[in-house]
Amino acid sequence: MSTDWDVAIGAYLAIGAVLLLVIYVHHRLTRVERSDWVQAALRASDPERHTLGYRVMADFVAPALAAVFIWALWPAALAMAARWKWKAWKEEQQLKARKDAQDNQEPVEMSELIERLSIESIEARETIHDPLQAAPATPFGHLGAAWVAFRSQLQPQDELWSFVAVRADEWGLQEETGGYAAVRDGAIAAHFTSRRKKAGM
């Protein structure tokens, strides 16, 4: 009986090791390097990044803990990865829906603007930090392509502001949207919606 258990445990750990290797190779092949100015913005927004303790934690301890978790509890890791992939797919579908409805969107009002920010500070605050690398480590994660498209429309004199707006959806329910708007010549020229939820939730 003990031999059967030994074989089962050995096979279980071997599968975890293979999965960990696949994830590592995939990460190395697909990772996106942050530009120098994004890294500078991240360091400016969080001075702790300069410390040795932070670097040890971010570069060694967190990846090591993630690796041990995947190796020892790979069924749970697979379930979490599947959940993230499903969430990413839903976000992509929502993004397509937003693009399709862009022409029918109500404009953001000046009164709904919250705070003026720079591109660097926005991308620093919106960069995804996922130790398991399920979401890309880029500004806005899976919405990164839409952000890049929005950013490409900006002109040098534009001001960027965060906003929160509450609108009624097609069912008459209150929906809260948030994101960033470009102000040009005292008016809102374009906006990027990064989050959407039912008001009050």
Image (tube, grey):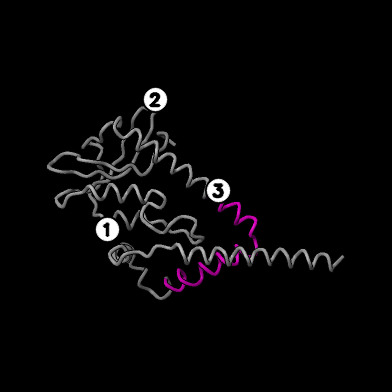
C-alpha span from label 3 to label 1: 30 Å
Quarter where residue 183 is shown: top left
Q: Position of residue 131 (x, y in %)?
A: 49, 62
- Dot 3: few (<14), some (14–19), or many (≥20) neighbours within 10 Å? few
Say which of marks 3 and 1 sits in front: 3
Q: Is residue 57 magenta?
A: yes
- Name the residue furthest right: 1
The residue tagged 3 is: 83
Residue at image location 50% in from the left, 45% down from the top = 87
Q: Position of residue 179 (x, y in %)?
A: 32, 44
Of pointers 1 and 2, the one earlier in the residue sequence: 1
Residue at image location 48% in from the left, 42% down from the top = 90
Q: Quadrant of the C terminus?
A: top left
Apparent side of residue 6 relative to residue 57 in the rendered image (left or right) = right
- Name the residue furthest left: 185
Q: Amino acid at mark 3?
A: Arg
The residue tagged 1 is: 120
Task: Decide whether the magenta segment is chiefly helix, strand or loop.
Answer: helix
Q: Position of residue 77 (x, y in %)?
A: 60, 57
User: What range of the chain is rendered magenta?
Assistant: 55-84
Q: Are marks 3 and 1 in contact (CB under 8 Å)?
A: no
The residue tagged 2 is: 170
Residue 143, labelled with which disc?
A: none
Q: Nearer the viewer, residue 148 or 137?
A: 148
Q: Quadrant of the N terminus?
A: bottom right
Q: Amino acid at mark 2?
A: Glu
